Image: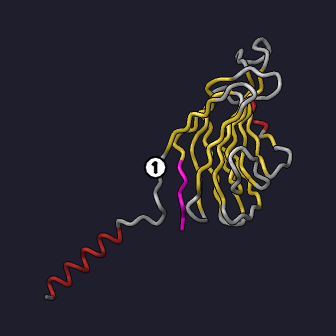
């Protein structure tokens, strides 16, 4: 009987060591490919607060438009109906502005740039991002603790106040093909 109890305690100890502190999520890939002047969105639920969404985004192709610039957005936002833009959000945008290939340093057809984006306020462009080679992979991480969103873009980080009760992760692209890879949402509860 004592031996059985000792073995049971040992088995429970080993099984507790195997339980991770944070819920592990499988990474997904999302190929967000839209025609000129169109947009596509993917809304992912967050499994409780706090959580972190991380991954990479890369521009694959531009769609020619005289009206809209190709853009990909990653946001932590209030939940809305499909096709509706949320009033409250924080995140970032990756823009690609068409350019004259003869006037760009590498003969690139566009200039790529990153900006922070928060609840309808004017985007804050990261100046060094305009030096990034077109189509470069951009890693990102957004963490939400119920009061703030911390946006990490490479070596840059910025905190935005955000207080929403039912957050979602919103991926949007317009007027081009952007590929999101290694996309995970990890809960820390």
- 47 displayed left or right of 59: left
Quarter occupied by residue 10? bottom left
Per the image, is 80 magenta?
no
Closer to us: 132 or 120: 120
**First to last magenta residue range:** 184-189
Residue occupying the point 68% across, 23% down: 62
Which secondary structure, mark 1?
loop
Q: Visible in this render: residue 89?
A: yes
User: Is 95 placed left or right of 169 in the picture?
Assistant: right
Q: Residue at (66%, 59%) from the top-left corner?
A: 167
- Residue 44: x %, y % from top left: 59, 51
Where's the N terminus, which quadrant?
bottom left
**Colour mode of the rendering:** secondary structure
Q: Is residue 169 above or below residue 132?
A: below
* Depicted 12 relative to depicted 64: above or below: below
Quadrant placement of the C terminus = bottom right
Within the image, what quadrant is residue 15 found in?
A: bottom left
Q: Residue at x 80, y 52 (%)?
A: 119
Instruction: Give the image location of residue 73, x and y in percent.
Output: 70, 41
- Residue found at the far front of this picture: 81
Of all residues shown, which one is farthest toward the top? Answer: 102
Identify the residue at image location x=76%, y=18%. 104
Q: Is residue 180 above or below residue 162?
A: above
* Image coords of residue 49 (percent x, y): 61, 65
The residue sitting at the right extreme is: 122
**Count of labels shown?**
1
Which residue lies under the disc numbered 1? 26
Q: Position of residue 71 (x, y in %)?
A: 72, 34
**Magenta: predominant secondary structure element?**
strand
Quadrant of the rendered structure where residue 162 is? Answer: bottom right
In this rendered view, identify the residue nearer to me: 175 or 155.
175
Residue 131 visible, this orientation: no
């Amino acid at each position: 009987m004592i031996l059985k109890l000792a073995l049971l305690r040992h088995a429970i100890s080993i099984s507790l060591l195997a339980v991770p502190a944070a819920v592990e999520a499988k990474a997904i890939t999302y190929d967000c490919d839209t025609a000129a002047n169109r947009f596509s969105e993917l809304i992912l639920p967050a499994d409780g607060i706090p959580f972190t969404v991380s991954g990479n985004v890369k521009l694959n192709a531009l769609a020619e438009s005289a009206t809209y610039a190709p853009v990909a957005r990653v946001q932590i936002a209030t939940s809305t109906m499909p096709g509706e833009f949320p009033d409250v959000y924080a995140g970032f945008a990756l823009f690609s502005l068409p350019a004259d290939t003869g006037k760009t340093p590498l003969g690139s057809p566009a200039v790529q740039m990153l900006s922070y984006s928060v609840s309808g306020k004017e985007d804050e462009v990261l100046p060094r991002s305009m030096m990034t080679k077109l189509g470069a992979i951009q890693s990102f991480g957004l963490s939400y603790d119920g009061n703030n969103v911390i946006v990490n873009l490479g070596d840059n980080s910025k905190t935005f106040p955000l207080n929403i009760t039912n957050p979602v992760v919103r991926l949007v692209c317009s007027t081009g093909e952007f590929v999101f890879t290694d996309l995970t949402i990890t809960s820390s509860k």
